[in-house]
Image (tube, rainbow, N blue to C red):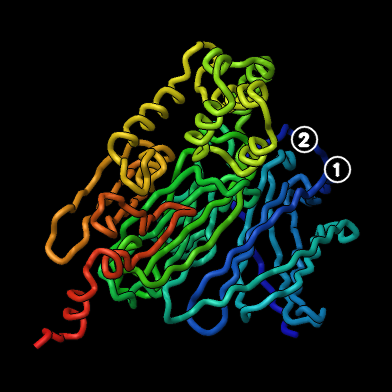
Amino acid sequence: MLIYFKRTLVTTLLVWGGLIFLTGLIYAEPSSLDFSYSYSCYAEKGEKTTVEFFFRFSENGLTYSENFGRLLIDFKLYDTLNQPIDSYLWMVDHETAEGGPVGKIFGGRERFEASPGIYYVKVRLTDALQPTRFDTTSFQLEVRRFDRDKIALSDIDITTEMAPTDDTTHPFARGNYILMRNIDGIIGPPEHRLNSYVEIYNADKIPASQFDLLWIIADSTGKGVYLHDTLIRRPSTSSIFEINSVVVNGLKSGWYILAAKVFNGRRNSGATDSAEVVRGFWVWNPKIDSLTNVRQELISERMDLIDPLYSGMKEEELDREYAVAEYLMSETKRNVWKSLSGTEPKSRFLTQFWLALDDDLTTPENPFRDDYFERVDLARKLYYSQTTPKGWDSDRGRVLLTYGTPDGVERRPNEQNRRPYEIWTYNSLQIEFVFVDMGSTGSYKLVHSTGRNEIQYPEWERDYVILHDQWYREETGDQGF
């Protein structure tokens, strides 16, 4: 077992708490250390993976003599059989303000190399000036393996602050940036800004001249709430980094997932490989929570109401209304509907469903429902065919109702040796949909999309649009004579 020793100077992250008046060379009994940590893996030279261990603690948790305190961090690595692998001893020196500690929070970063695999980590934290005061923690450490030939991503770092720097000796410098890690992963007021950093490896080896990097945020149910696409030119070096910053003040409090996904080309055409990493974070947003609670109270007050629109409908008419709205239903709601029988429970279900989608419950109008059924009428007129007589039951109809009116439509109805196709673009969602008229009957099928949980088939143009005999001659050079 190897033992490594290092002394660390800490950097102030945040000031909070009140002033504590202490006297004497050794101050009064310290309080909790409030130690917290996180780690990230990076690919660098060699076969081993670089691991950076980030930590923070309260200065109130140390004993001081003449304004000087020291934290000892004994960091031990064990394999899955509980056999010792490596050991590191880090000394963190801290000089407090005159008069003693005032509740500042300090952070540090240590780094080491390890072979890819699963480890068990034991950490002992000791107050050096009062060694009888110590604490312990343990956790599982997964050291990632990075492929040296394929495009890959480091772990995502979520930060409280990011600033460019040329000082590579700064204790928090990485990728020409100073990164103050958000160790707790909590995004809160006043800005609700989510800053993130990721490194991209081996992009210089990809065949394309440009490639896509997606940033995605999903809630705890997996529903996407944010997507941003960055187009990057192929670099000349094997390692580059990208940062992203987004305000999430429209999200309610809860657990979310941040994902970064990189492709070895354009994601909607030509990419043959990709890599993805995820990291969880918390949003604390009491303002949105309060508005949500008020909204829920208004909905609860109307639980027994039936919209006059449905009061005179027969059960068959209610079933047709549900069928049109089913694209918006969750699996849970679909199962509830299947269990209902009779006009009253079905009318109440549809009333509650549309109420939940109404942005303003203080008015009798429901613009969301009105807009939805305008698109239903539009789909009936535009997308009717023998195989989809209702129009809205076609692939284009489903996308129109689910995602709204596209920002752009590229139509290619008459090109030699090619089937008719359309490409729909949603700029705000950074999503595209490709529809192909497979039989030249006017019935377009969805063959590819860049949307989450939608069909993805990057070779759609080769396999669905170009007529096979023409594609065969181009690929093989056979001219047929």
Amino acid of disc 2: Ile
Q: Residue 326 — which label? A: none
Q: Earlier in the sequence, mark 2 or mark 1?
A: 2
Q: Where residue 188 appears, x then y in whole percent?
A: 59, 36
Q: Residues within 10 Å of mark 2 (few under 14, many from 20)?
A: few
381 sits left or right of 332 in the view: left
Q: Element type at marker 2?
A: loop
Q: Where residue 161 appears, x then y in whole percent?
A: 50, 47
Is 28 drawn above or below residue 446 in the view shown?
above
Q: Element type at marker 1?
A: loop
Q: Residues within 10 Å of mark 1 (few under 14, many from 20)?
A: some
222 sits left or right of 241 in the view: right
- Comparing 268 with 318, the one in front is 318
Q: Residue 20 — which label? A: 2
- Comparing 79 with 27, the one in front is 79
Q: Is residue 225 visible?
A: yes
| Structural distance between the alpha carbons of marks 2 and 1 | 10 Å
Q: Residue furthest right?
A: 132
Residue sitting at x 49%, y 64% = 276
Q: Residue furthest left?
A: 481
Amino acid of disc 1: Ala
Q: Where residue 394 appears, x then y in whole percent?
A: 38, 45
Q: Residue 28 — which label? A: 1
* Quadrant (top left/top right/bottom left/bottom right) for the N terminus: bottom right
Residue sitting at x 54%, y 84% = 47
258 sits left or right of 297 in the view: left
Q: Residue furthest bottom?
A: 481
* Quadrant (top left/top right/bottom left/bottom right) for the C terminus: bottom left
159 sits left or right of 213 in the view: right
Instruction: Look at the numbered discs 2 and 1 and tell me whether their residues touch, using CB distance below 8 Å.
Output: yes
- Comparing 60 with 224, the one in front is 224
